[in-house]
Amino acid sequence: MIKISEVAIIMSENDNMAIAKKNTKKGTILQHLQEKLKILDLIPQGHRFALTDIPKGKLVKQYGEPFGISTGIKQGEIISQYNVRSYEPRIRRIKRNESRIERKNKKHKYVDKTFLGYKRSDGQIGTRNFYLVLPTSLCASDVASRIAFLLDTNKTLKKKYKNIDGIVAASHTEGCGCNDGEIIDRLLLTLKNTITHPNIGGALIIDLGCEKTNKKLFSKYLGNIQKHKKPIDFLSIQDSGGTIKSILAGKDIILKRLQRVNNVARQKVSIKNLVIGTECGASDSFSGITANPLIGKVADKIISAGGAAILSEIPEMVGAEINLIKRMKNKNIVQKFIDGMNYYKNLAKKLNVSLKGNFVPGNEKGGLVNLTLKSLGAILKGGSSEIVDFVDYAEKIKKRGLSIMNGPGNDLESMTGIVASGANIILFSTGMGATEGNLIVPVIKISSRTELYKKMIDDIDFDAGCLLLEKTSIDKLGDELLDLAIAVSSGKKTKAEILNKRSFQIWSAGKLSL
């Protein structure tokens, strides 16, 4: 008879199911609570099996939380979408006298930790120093990309300007051929907050000339350029005489600005200046067991030192709303969160689609049962700290602590919004193997399993899979990941940066991104 801890994980004493750490054969006898448990099916790695009989109509639980309703499951039987019906707890109406869970973020030993960052004249702290070529619309994106590529691949410039991490283009597909209103507003907010991000030392803004988001409109939206205290220039393709002339003109403008952008050096600053963006992609059953809780642990450590973190991916909160509401600082944040969830749900209804589209075949293959279970694991990236605010997509966070951003589950769109909201480093968990990075912020990839880490060693920075082998505690491993985050924030390149993974994709209003 084998101890259940050797082959499976039970996340909470209130759970009525366990997750297989490795393939477990049918007929295997396990010892659980001094009793025998016989496995009735082949349980693949990452899949779940019942610890006890779960009669029809009873709740199936992981993390001590319900995620499904049993259709009749026997002890030792595999748990899947075929014997579990969906379960989504109702969000209760907010009452004026309703109490909430009080959470205090106590100061900890992490207060004294530092990293080497770029201190900007406006007080912001960057982890990188990029020059940005930013098109105001899809119509200018090609020219912007050509200019950035021409200069970024110039080895002489790299050698001369060693404090510049790259010359990059924020090419995108928005800005014209669309309605006014929310679509344009979201684009302008994302572009503005990307330009003013502390990882940007200077920018060249390019328009075609006749689009909705041309220089006239964008200049008005950006406001007084001087207040941003960095070199920001404009270039219009039509006014310049077309593609070739614009490329040459853009090149000349940037070459005159690089010395100023380069005139900054890293200096020691407190980790309270870190803003952790959290992301998960290509999740498997172990993402919510190892990598996501580990990210949450690091977010809590940063917040305890006075820093900040951002949790997003609204479609991956469906079914786990109550767990988040209990941690919110006040009823105003609760209402903003509910309104944000309803925004997504109403958009889905208008487009006649379902938020369940966020649950993809790879999730099922990896052992996840439904969207609620995926959500319960996904929100663990936000740790256990008090939730201090809810902001719109790409809106700058206003408070230290944990904020939720109203954003999609789509990795690239989510990261673009999180960075625009102020994240200067991203911790990204993956169970199946996601590979993308971000245009201006370093992305640390964290595998949920050691097998994945070894298989995709060129893409993955950190292995959370050793938690499955009980070789270390989550707190100790959290310290190791925090040390890596500090090293990366101080200049160490991530695997995505080494591979030049520079993704930038804006979530277009009116589009249901899952």
Image: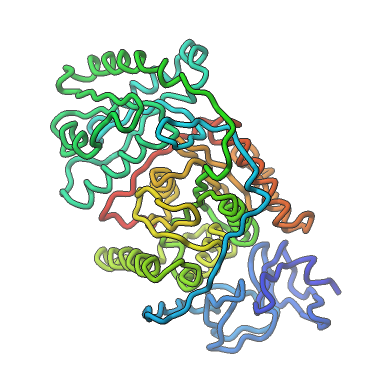
Depth check: 345 or 57 in front? 345
Q: Quadrant of the C terminus?
A: bottom left
Please tell me whether residue 510 is drawn above or below residue 158 in the rendered image: below
x, y percent for residue 77: 66, 78
Residue in the image at 40% along x and 37% along y: 197
x, y percent for residue 456: 63, 41
Depth check: 259 or 194 in front? 259
Q: Does residue 99 appear to the left or right of 267 in the view shown?
A: left
Please tell me whether residue 97 is drawn above or below residue 62 in the rendered image: below
Q: Quadrant of the N terminus?
A: bottom right
x, y percent for residue 310: 47, 53
Please tell me whether residue 510 is drawn above or below residue 44 in the rendered image: above
Q: Does residue 287 appear to the left or right of 8 in the view shown?
A: left
x, y percent for residue 226: 29, 29
Residue in the image at 66% along x and 84% along y: 74
Which residue sits furthest right?
1
Depth check: 49 or 142 in front? 142
Asked if residue 451 can be seen in this view, the reply is no
Asked if residue 171 can be seen in this view, the reply is yes
Depth check: 430 or 169 in front? 169
Colour mapping: rainbow
Residue in the image at 58% along x and 43% along y: 271
Q: Does residue 351 appear to the left or right of 197 in the view shown?
A: left
For the image, the number of numbered tags is 0
